Image (tube, rainbow, N blue to C red):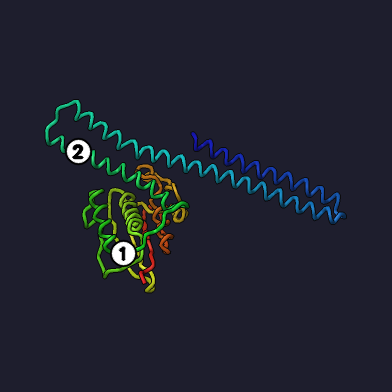
Amino acid sequence: MVVAGRRRSIAFFIALGAGLISVILLLYIGWVLLNWRTGILLFLGVLLLALIITGVLLNTLFLVREIRRNEQHDAFINAVTHELKTPVASIRLYLETLQTHTVSEEKRKEFYRIMLEDSDRLLGTIEQILRTGRVGPSRRKLYLAPIDLGAVVEGCLARVRNLYQVAPEFLEYQPGPPVSILGDLDEVQAAVTNLLENAVKYSGSQIRVSVDIEQVDGKYVSLRVKDQGIGIPRSELKRIFKRFHRVPGLLSTRVKGTGLGLFIVRSVAKRHGGRAWAESEGPGRGSTFLLQFPLAK
């Protein structure tokens, strides 16, 4: 209902702007026909008309942008609320069970394992939000040092395989020669992890992800993460890197997330003098994400 109301608001402001411009044009044309000999007034009228039309257009664009931004913020708040509330509720439930019931040692260990997993999920969400602030406008200073990108990828792969219980043959990586970049280890790890998690989460039930590293023109090193998942519409290939943005669709609503992962990936790439982009042939045809860093001198 809220989204429908905002869409009606957008349509209203667009219609209002178009109506005002139409009225102004009609009045102006009539005025010109009656005063065509007055050159100075004609010039001033043209200038005034241009200013009014520009103001109306800018006002309409601003309102539409603000409405869309509010929608993104609401979606982010809902996602974060769910990501924070669900593990807390789960941990509380198991703690209450342990407190009020006698359980076997085997069950107790299982409860502890689940609570630790929920704690990791909770910490991951908090870290994602905090990291967004660190790579945003008030970003912290980079602590640069030589980094073996291959070693970082292997470490992130091990974490993601363990977190999502993915067998090595379904999340493949063929190590190559050592490749060194100059970067902030914490941020580079975050960017690589987000790319890998994104590929796994949006692969659906059939996870097939391949990862490789290659040098480009002797100046850059490119990390390629390719999946065979749900794919991305061409119109969304640039939008997915925006803060809070999530591609509309059935699977997107099921996949847990805050809409910050790919924003962090691109922000980290830019801070290191590199870039990040996505390629896809469309829905159902998989996606390829590329993260590029300058080679260490």
Q: Which mark is residue 147?
A: 1
Q: Position of residue 138 (x, y in %)?
A: 46, 51
- In this rendering, the answer to whether 189 lies above or below 250 is below
Q: Position of residue 232 (x, y in %)?
A: 41, 53
Q: Which mark is residue 63?
A: none
- In this rendering, the answer to whether 50 lies above or below 7 is below
Q: Is residue 287 left or right of residue 17?
A: left
Q: Position of residue 186 (x, y in %)?
A: 33, 56
- In this rendering, the answer to whether 180 lies above or below 68 is below
Q: Which quarter of the figure is the C terminus placed in?
A: bottom left
Q: Which residue is mark 2?
A: 112
Q: Is residue 133 left or right of residue 45?
A: left
Q: Please tell me which residue lies in front, 80 or 230.
A: 80
Residue 147 appears in the rendering: yes
Q: Indicate the secondary structure of the residue bearing disc 1.
A: strand
Q: Is residue 175 left or right of residue 136?
A: left
Q: Position of residue 176 (x, y in %)?
A: 26, 68
What residue is shown at x 49% (from left), y 34% (from top)? 1
What residue is shown at x 41% (from left), y 57% (from top)? 141
Residue ranking furthest to the top: 100
What residue is shown at x 27% (from left), y 53% (from top)? 207
Q: Indicate the secondary structure of the residue bearing disc 2.
A: helix
Q: Of discs 2 and 1, which sits in the foreground?
A: 1
Residue ranking furthest to the bottom: 218
Task: Give the amino acid at mark 1.
Answer: Ile
- Crowding at mark 2 (Cα within 10 Å: few <14, some 14-19, many 20+): some
**Residue 104 image-quadrant placement:** top left
- For the residues labelled 2 and 1, the Cα–Cα distance comes to 36 Å
Q: Please tell me which residue lies in front, 176 or 10.
A: 176
- Crowding at mark 1 (Cα within 10 Å: few <14, some 14-19, many 20+): some
What residue is shown at x 35% (from left), y 40% (from top)? 83
Of mark 2 and mark 1, the one earlier in the sequence is 2
